[in-house]
Image: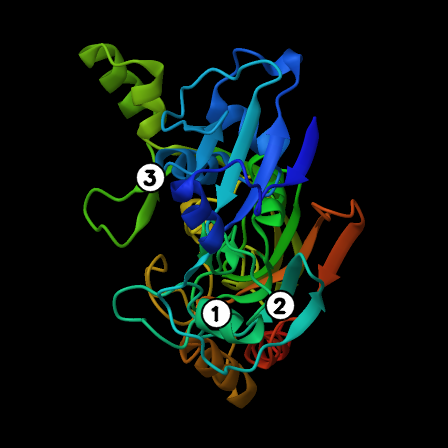
């Protein structure tokens, strides 16, 4: 595969010259082994900076030429030894505005950035949270360093943490890094460990939760575990395909391990009133840990969406006990922290691993729980 810059080629007509004035051009000679391949599939191989969706957009915009003839169909079959010219338009300005918001940066290079997201920060602008988000902060912090994700000068967000969940996150600065990170997440080649403080204890103390999660049919802001038997019967009754069945919930797997137990639920059973539990994700569904832990009877302390009531059910009495239960009752968010993120750098191949302790409010909660009588 051969490449060359073609911005000032005298063989181009006036239309092409105008395009050259606004964009860099790249010439790629298609190897014979890719003959017959779809153009939108081959271009990301020939030019890794392009994702397939971005390649399709560039093609449909009329910015790909074969022998000076514009190709506008993503289904175009690659011609062996064809001379393809890609005129890459400059990235558009991102719609969210840059904001000078301090970030706790754990690592940064020209390809990606790792941050420790604080409690209360929304990751991406949305209705009701159009500013003050992580994206707004990254647009300011990474100004001049973003090569464009999908043709827009923005950071590539490949995973999210809920507003009130703290911890380690990665974002891409380039389309190539974004594509690589997305592939790692989709293939589950990421180490992701969270620390959760639960009300009650999961049983058994070490386990694996595997089911499907879908949006609740009664509250669109919530997610819920799909009743497999119900949907299996529904699929059989209505003659739905496997794809239809898959849409009735996304496969979700959480592996958990209780690290520490606190207090007792009552005087006789010996069951702990709360735990510090490590949750490791194999999938990354919306609210996955919160939904899964509530599903097995150990909701997160402070989770006002998936917890049935606030506070703590525990055995004990006295000022210290009362102080602890008050701390639990007043904990205003889900007690969840993304503690570990590990992956292979999508560009350099370096093994990356980042670990952060829980924020102070969770540390104070854990210290209070340790005062409960065992």
For label 2, the residue is 115
For label 3, the residue is 214
Query: Would residue 245 appear left or right of 280 to someone viewing this image?
Result: left
Q: Is residue 167 visible?
A: yes
Which label was assigned to residue 134? 1
Of badges 2 and 3, nearer the viewer stands 2
In terms of depth relative to the viewer, which is nearer, 94 or 369?
A: 94
Q: Residue at x 47, y 36 (%)?
A: 55
Q: Residue at x 68, y 35 (%)?
A: 3
Q: Quadrant of the C terminus?
A: bottom right
Which badge, 3 or 1, comes first in the chain's sequence? 1
What whole-number distance in Å separates the C-alpha atoms at marks 3 and 1? 26 Å
Q: Residue at x 30, y 52 (%)?
A: 222
Q: Secondary structure at mark 1?
A: helix
Question: x, y (%) of residue 369?
Answer: 58, 74
Q: Secondary structure at mark 3?
A: strand
Residue placed farthest to the front in the image? 10
């Amino acid at each position: 595969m051969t490449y060359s810059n073609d911005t000032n080629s005298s063989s181009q007509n006036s239309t092409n010259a105008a395009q050259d004035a606004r964009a860099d051009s790249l010439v790629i000679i298609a190897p014979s082994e890719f003959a017959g391949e779809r153009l939108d599939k081959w271009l990301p191989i020939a030019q890794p900076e392009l994702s397939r969706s971005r390649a399709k957009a560039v093609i449909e915009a009329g910015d790909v030429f074969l022998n000076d003839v514009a190709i506008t169909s993503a289904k175009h079959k690659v011609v062996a030894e064809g001379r393809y010219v890609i005129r890459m338009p400059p990235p558009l300005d991102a719609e969210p505005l840059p904001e000078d918001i301090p970030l706790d940066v754990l690592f940064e290079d020209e390809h990606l950035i790792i941050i420790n997201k604080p409690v209360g920060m929304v990751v991406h602008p949305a209705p009701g949270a159009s500013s003050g988000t992580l994206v707004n902060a990254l647009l300011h912090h990474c100004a001049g360093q973003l090569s464009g994700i999908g043709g827009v000068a923005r950071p590539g967000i490949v995973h999210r943490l809920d507003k009130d969940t703290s911890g380690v996150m990665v974002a891409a600065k380039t389309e190539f890094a974004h594509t690589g990170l997305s592939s790692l997440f989709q293939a589950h080649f990421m180490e992701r460990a969270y620390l959760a403080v639960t009300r009650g204890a999961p049983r058994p103390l070490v386990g694996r939760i595997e089911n499907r999660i879908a949006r609740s049919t009664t509250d669109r802001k919530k997610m819920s575990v799909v009743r497999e038997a119900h949907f299996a019967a529904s699929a059989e009754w209505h003659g739905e395909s496997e794809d239809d069945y898959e849409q009735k919930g996304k496969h979700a797997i959480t592996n958990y391990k209780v690290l520490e137990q606190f207090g007792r639920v009552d005087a006789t059973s010996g069951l702990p009133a709360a735990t510090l539990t490590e949750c490791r994700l194999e999938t990354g569904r919306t609210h996955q840990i919160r939904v899964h832990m509530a599903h097995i009877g150990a909701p997160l302390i402070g989770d006002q969406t998936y917890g049935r009531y606030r506070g703590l059910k525990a055995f004990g009495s006295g000022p210290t006990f009362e102080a602890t239960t008050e701390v639990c009752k007043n904990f205003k968010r889900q007690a969840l922290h993304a503690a570990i993120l590990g992956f292979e750098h999508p560009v350099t191949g370096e093994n990356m691993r980042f670990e952060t302790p829980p924020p102070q409010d969770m540390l104070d909660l854990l210290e209070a729980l340790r005062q409960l009588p065992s």
